[in-house]
Image (cartoon, rainbow, N blue to C red):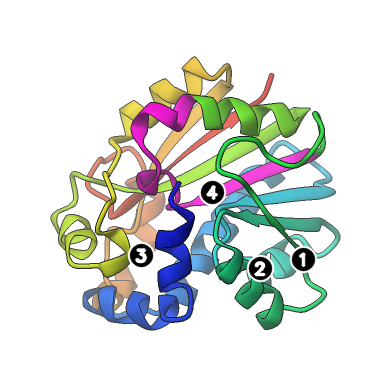
Amino acid sequence: MDKAEFDKFAEEYRAMHVANIGASGETPEYFAEYKVRDVAQLVAKHEPVVSRILDFGAGIGSSVPYFCQYFPAAELTCVDVSDKSLAIGAARFPGNARFEAFDGRRLPFPDNVFDLAFAACVFHHIPHAEHIDLLQELRRVLTPRGRLIVFEHNPFNPLTVQAVNTCPFDENARLIRAHTMRYHFVAAGFRDLKVRYRIFFPRALRILRPLETLLGWLPLGAQYYVAARKH
């Protein structure tokens, strides 16, 4: 994980993101919220209480207001390799989360701390050879019944590929197939895995979005998530 690369784009991140997702007709906030809402719906089926949440690769804190909305009783910790991004996030959302630096290898927390860990389109910035080690590190800091949910871009969606290929902060990105990410989860020791594809319709076709609940199996969505339990 290249700290300098993310520091370089921290101040312009949202503006570049807006330009990059223009074809979708949505804002960065739409994409940030849908992910946290998905997490809340998934967790609500299994876990009555989530007390501590880790946002891995939190950047400038785009998910923070939605974790506060959907998990109002939880303590949120944001980690990132980019000090500049963390400083921006802390200034945007003072008092809503802890913002802590991460060296790219070992999380600065003891074992069995978090009920939930979350990563939003982070792993395509990380060399694939490092994925299993980082997933094992995330597993280490989860409680025994803790869950990890990772969202990623779908390399089988041509609009997603186009957006990534033209985005300055994705210049060194390598997209990950869902089945590859699932394999990495298994290799890292996770259990009870679920894969679901997301975002099939742009804003112009938002009237069709209720159908997405039936399309999670179809590998054509713009993004997907892999969710799993530690034990």
User: x, y percentage for residue 143?
Assistant: 79, 30
Q: Is residue 87 toward the left or the right of residue 207 in the image?
A: right
Q: Return the residue at label 3.
A: 209
Q: Which of marks 2 and 1 is nearer the N terminus?
A: 2
Q: Helix, strand, or loop for circle 4?
A: strand
Residue in the image at 47% along x and 80% along y: 11
**Disc nearer the start of the sequence (3/4):** 4
| Residue at the spot 64% in from the left edge and 48% down from the top edge | 102
Q: Mark 1 points at which residue?
A: 97
Three-letter code for the amino acid on which mark 2 is drawn = Val
**In what element is the residue under mark 3?**
helix
The quadrant of the picture occupied by the C terminus is top right
Q: Where in the figure is residue 55, as x and y percent of width and height?
A: 64, 53
Is residue 197 rendered magenta in the image? no
What is the crowding at mark 1: few (fewer than 14 residues within 10 Å), some, or many (at least 20)?
A: many
State whether residue 33 is above or below residue 137. Answer: below
Q: Give the range drawn in magenta.
A: 114-132
Residue 105, numbered label: none
Q: Tag 3 or tag 2, which sits nearer the N-term?
A: 2
Describe the element under mark 2 as helix, strand or loop: helix
Q: Earlier in the sequence, mark 3 or mark 1?
A: 1
**Dot in front, 2 or 1:** 1
Q: Residue at x 35, y 46 (%)?
A: 124
Marks 2/4: CA distance? 12 Å
Tell me residue 168's x, y (percent): 26, 68
Query: Which residue, given by chain and number where applicable, does mark 4 sit on?
Result: 119
